[in-house]
Structure formats: structure tokens, C-alpha cells
Image (spheres, helix red, strand yellow):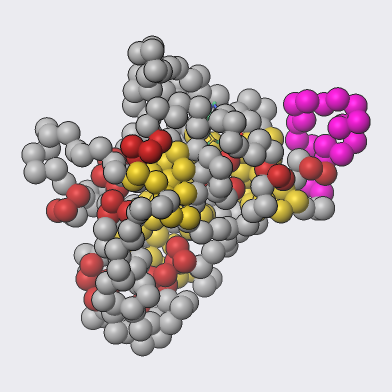
Amino acid sequence: MGTNLRPYPWQDPWVKMATHTLPIQVGWPWAAKPMGRIAGFINRCFVYSKSLKISKGIKIPSDCAGCDCEGDCANNKNCSCAQLNGSDLPYVSFKNIGRLVEPKAVVFECGANCSCNRNCVNRTSQQGLQHRLEVFKTASKGWGVRTWDTILPGAPICEYVGVLKRTEEVDGLLHNNYIFDIDCLQTMKGLDGREKRAGSDMNMPSLHAENDSEAPPAPEYCIDAGSVGSFARFINHSCNPNLFVQCVLTNHHDVKLAKVMLFAADTILPLQELCYDYGYVLNSVVSADGEIVKLPCCCGAPDCRKRLY
Ligand SMILES: C[S@@+](CC[C@H](N)C(=O)[O-])C[C@H]1O[C@@H](n2cnc3c(N)ncnc32)[C@H](O)[C@@H]1O
């Protein structure tokens, strides 16, 4: 961890301590005796959702034109936002929560200039937290996040928030474990689960390299949750994840600056830990002196790749 991090979730103003008790005890790694008494209390933190901060010098494109639907876009066959998504809306509504039908290269949501209502299903990622989630201490991965509620496949979990920066600003920050590159193409083509789930939905010409053998351009922007962020930064990696990453565009249509959202890939039962595939390429992390940095994976999946990177 970098020195600029708040190492404990309850020191983070965006993480609220809960006084509730759970029928389980979670471990306390530094269990000195006086700490032991309060450990049960401070191990349980409920979480808030927060928005992205923008680093100086980054200009967010202006809001693009919106649809002219009334009410919910689900009721309008001619919704222009649905057309952007390939004619169908990307979400269906179930018990008033939108659920993503399938992962896409990018999801176009309704934005500032759309005339539909604020609860339109095509604003699903804008509705805030839908589930009770908890930051807890895991046995071997530091802090993690788990759910108190059953979460259904395709349900929105949260946005990965922090400070939006240019990737060149954070290059070489090996000790900051909270940097998320905004890379819609990589996200879509990502490792294992992501690729398997994606089907053949690569219908975004602007996201394809001209020639498939050509390396896609390196991501220009990233989200740094090292010093500010939400509980999303405590979500760990799994080689068999129950969440997936989805790029979402709302007000503007610049994929380089898409919102990074996490959605449920499966039905997730209460007290299960939430995890997504970080998608590192093995041996891709190199220290300043040229050594390959290796991080063992403790996700415990039967098909674990054994290393995060
Ligand atoms: C974005 S942070 C996740 C939150 C982190 N557990 C914490 O306590 O702050 C990423 C870091 O968590 C740890 N981590 C996440 N998933 C892991 C896994 N499957 N196995 C081992 N360590 C993991 C690694 O140290 C990684 O660099």
C-alpha cells in the first residue's frame, strides 16, 4: 500500500461504521487484547457510494444530445439511446432495479439532455447503491467487501470511483494498488470469465483496432482510488469472479473517459464476498529495476491462476 492511503476503512469518511452485529465473527489480524474487545465492532463497516473527482487539466467532454422519450425509455420503441445500444435497451427492470441483460463493449445510458425521467431503466448505473454491503477483514487478502443481500445476475453494484487521472501521472506507482485503467476494449476482451460471458457483442466499431493483430492503444486515463475513493477499492480479485466490469457512458460519448461500473455476474448470496477479475496479464508488472513483480493469488477458486500478476 502507498503511504498516502488511509489503511483502515473506518478512517475513510466515505465508509460509515455500523453498530449492527452479524452472526459471524470476522478475524482481527492485529488482535492485541485491548483491540480484541472492540474488534467485533470496528470490523463491520457499511458503505456509501461517492462520485468521481477530476484531476486538474482533464476536460470532460460536454454533454451530448439526449433522447426525447417521456417517462421510462423502456416504453418507447424509438428511443435514440436504445439505438446507440444496438436497438434494445441494455437493461431490464426487475422489482424496480435495472439489470444488465449482457455485458457489452460499452453501455450508453440516458444522460443530462435526455427528457426521460430520473428513474428511467436506462439510468441504472446512476441510481446509487441498491444492496447492503459491508467492508470486512478477509483471512488472506486484506480488506474485502461482502453483501448482506441476495444480489441477482446483472444487478448494478457500484462505480469504481477515485480521482480521474492521465495514466502517465501514475506510471511507476508500483505501491498504489488502487489504480483502475479505463480501457473499454481490454475490459471487454478481458481474461477468463469476462471473455466467456461476453458472447459476440463486440459490435462497437470505434472500439476495434483496425487490424486485430495490432495492439490496441494504451489507456489514456485511469481512476486512482489510492487517496480518495469509495468501498469499491476494497473489492478483491478472484479468478472465478462473481462481478464483472462494464464501461458505461452517460452524458458524453468518449470511451476513453467512460465510467467504470461493476455488475453481478451470478446470483450472489448473503455474506458472499464480492470479487471481480482484475485482468492482469502475467509478468506484466515490472519494478523500477526491471524485475518482474509477482503477487500470489489467494482467491481460492478451483481454477485459480495462482498469481494476480
Ligand atoms: C484494490 S485492493 C483490494 C483491497 C485490499 N484487499 C485492501 O485491503 O485494501 C488490491 C489489493 O488487494 C490484494 N488482493 C486483492 N485480491 C487478492 C487476491 N485474490 N489474492 C491476494 N491478494 C489480493 C492485493 O494486495 C491487491 O494489490
Question: Quick one: which residue is furthest to the left in this view?
Answer: 211
User: Which residue is found at the position 61% from the left and 43% from the top?
Assistant: 145
Q: Is residue 210 left or right of residue 218?
A: left
Please tell me which residue lies in front, 32 or 93.
Answer: 32
Q: Does residue 28 sit above or below 117 in this rendering?
A: above
Give the main secondary structure, helix, strand or loop, of the magenta stretch: loop
Count of marks overlaid on the render: 0
Residue 5 lies in what quarter of the image? Answer: top right
Q: Is residue 9 left or right of residue 176?
A: right
| Camera sees residue 146 | yes
Please tell me which residue lies in front, 298 or 283.
Answer: 283
Q: Which residues are magenta?
A: 21-40
User: Which residue is found at the position 22% from the left and 71% from the top?
Assistant: 83
| Camera sees residue 266 | no
Q: Quadrant of ligand 1?
A: top right
Q: Position of residue 255 (x, y in %)?
A: 27, 54
Residue 37 lies in magenta, yes or no?
yes
- Image quarter (top left, top right, bottom left or bottom right) of the C terminus: top left
Q: Position of residue 24 (x, y in %)?
A: 78, 40
Q: Position of residue 23 (x, y in %)?
A: 80, 44
User: Which residue is found at the position 50% from the left and 19% from the top?
Assistant: 296
User: Which residue is found at the position 53% from the left and 40% from the top?
Assistant: 226
Residue 25 lies in magenta, yes or no?
yes
Q: Position of residue 303 (x, y in %)?
A: 44, 25
